[in-house]
Image: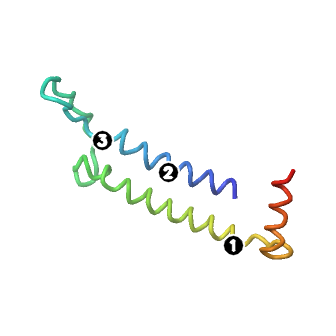
Amino acid sequence: LKEQLNSIVAITFNALGTPQRDAPPVQLSPKYPDPPPSAPTTTATNDPTAAFREQPKKLRADFVKAAKQFDALVASLPLSDGGEESQLRRIAEFQII
């Protein structure tokens, strides 16, 4: 579970950081000079923004896959003995301590 959760965290980190890293520069205000041109990238379609547009789709698919794997791992865990009442009783005992 821990490894799968780490995978989800890494995907989330990349999903948030990649657009920030790859976003083209923009001018914040007319008072500031124009931003420097971004480095040209080449793709099969010669569209420099194609990779930028496709990255979120891949990250979204990876995230959904990792979340489903996490759910499957949780579902495969054995049920605790005694059911929900027993769990609530144990929680109450731990809160007393």
Residue at horizontal 79%, vertical 72%? 78
- The amino acid marked with disc number 3 is Ala
Quick check: 49 left or right of 68? left
The residue indicated by pointer 1 is: 75
Q: Nearer the viewer, mark 2 or mark 3?
A: 2
- Count residues near mark 1 (Cα–Cα under 10 Å), then give few for <14, some for 14-19, many for 20+: few
Give the spatial CA distance, label 2 vs label 3. Answer: 17 Å
Give the spatial CA distance, label 1 vs label 2. Answer: 23 Å
Name the element at disc 1.
helix
Q: Residue 44: x and y, percent? A: 27, 53
Give the spatial CA distance, label 1 vs label 3. Answer: 39 Å
In this rendering, the count of numbered labels is 3
Furthest-bottom residue in this view = 83
| Image coloring type | rainbow
- The amino acid marked with disc number 2 is Thr
- The amino acid marked with disc number 1 is Ala
The residue indicated by pointer 2 is: 12
State if disc 2 and disc 1 touch (CB < 8 Å).
no
Name the element at disc 2.
helix
